């Protein structure tokens, strides 16, 4: 077998595995009450010591509207939360959209004298208290969604490696 093809194959497989390891995972609010939905994208499909920096994006919808998580608007986050490839198992994040009221999402949090023993919650307090404890945060599909920035970087790295190898073996 041509050494170039062998090396290019190894590089491609290695970069593919690296892309999978650095993939984002989306979790959606499922099984909740009518009028409630949400999604949160985390930077991996599993973590037992996650923090707010692991949140790529989040959005909750209640009967009062849709609220996107903006990191500068977060006023409370559980210090450590965790999730696995199937579901978010422990989390609490609250933020103040537009500086008025608050929105939040969570799962099985039991701190600060408050215990949510259900699978999760979505809430807002824009105009009236609105909360849904009926659902849970479950992973979308069985596969992680590729992180665009890291995947693009890996692609450029693979192209550069293959180009260098072709020049080397062409001479």
Image (cartoon, rainbow, N blue to C red):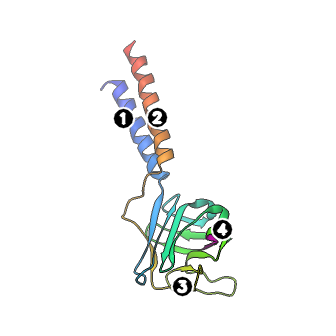
Query: Label 1 to label 2, Cα distance in Å?
Result: 16 Å
Q: Is residue 18 above or below residue 50?
A: above
Q: Residues within 10 Å of mark 4 (few under 14, many from 20)?
A: some
Nearer-the-camera pick, 105 or 130? 130
- Residues drawn in magenta: 93-97
Magenta stretch: includes residue 25:
no
Q: Please tell me which of labels 1 and 2 falls first in the chain.
A: 1
Q: Please tell me which of labels 3 and 1 falls first in the chain.
A: 1
| Point 60% across, 65% down: residue | 50
Q: Secondary structure at mark 3?
A: strand
Q: Quadrant of the C terminus?
A: top left
Q: Which residue is disc 3 drawn over?
A: 130
Q: Which residue is disc 4 drawn over?
A: 74
| Labelled disc at residue 156 | 2
| Labelled disc at residue 149 | none
Q: Is residue 84 left or right of residue 8?
A: right
Query: Label 4 to label 2, Cα distance in Å?
Result: 35 Å
């Amino acid at each position: 077998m041509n050494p170039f093809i062998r090396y290019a194959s190894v590089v491609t497989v290695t970069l593919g595995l690296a892309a999978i390891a650095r993939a984002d995972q989306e979790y959606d609010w499922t099984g909740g009450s009518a009028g409630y939905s949400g999604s949160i994208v985390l930077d991996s499909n599993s973590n037992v010591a996650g923090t707010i920096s692991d949140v790529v994006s989040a959005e909750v919808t209640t009967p009062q509207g849709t609220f996107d998580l903006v990191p500068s608007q977060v006023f409370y986050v559980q210090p450590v939360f965790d999730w696995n490839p199937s579901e978010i198992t422990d989390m609490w994040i609250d933020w103040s959209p537009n500086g008025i009221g608050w929105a939040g999402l969570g799962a099985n949090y039991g701190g600060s004298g408050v215990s949510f023993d259900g699978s999760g919650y979505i809430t807002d307090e824009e105009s009236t208290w609105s909360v849904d404890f009926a659902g849970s945060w479950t992973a979308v599909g069985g596969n992680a969604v590729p992180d665009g920035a890291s995947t693009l970087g890996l692609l450029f790295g693979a192209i550069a490696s293959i180009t260098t190898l072709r020049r080397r073996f062409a001479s």
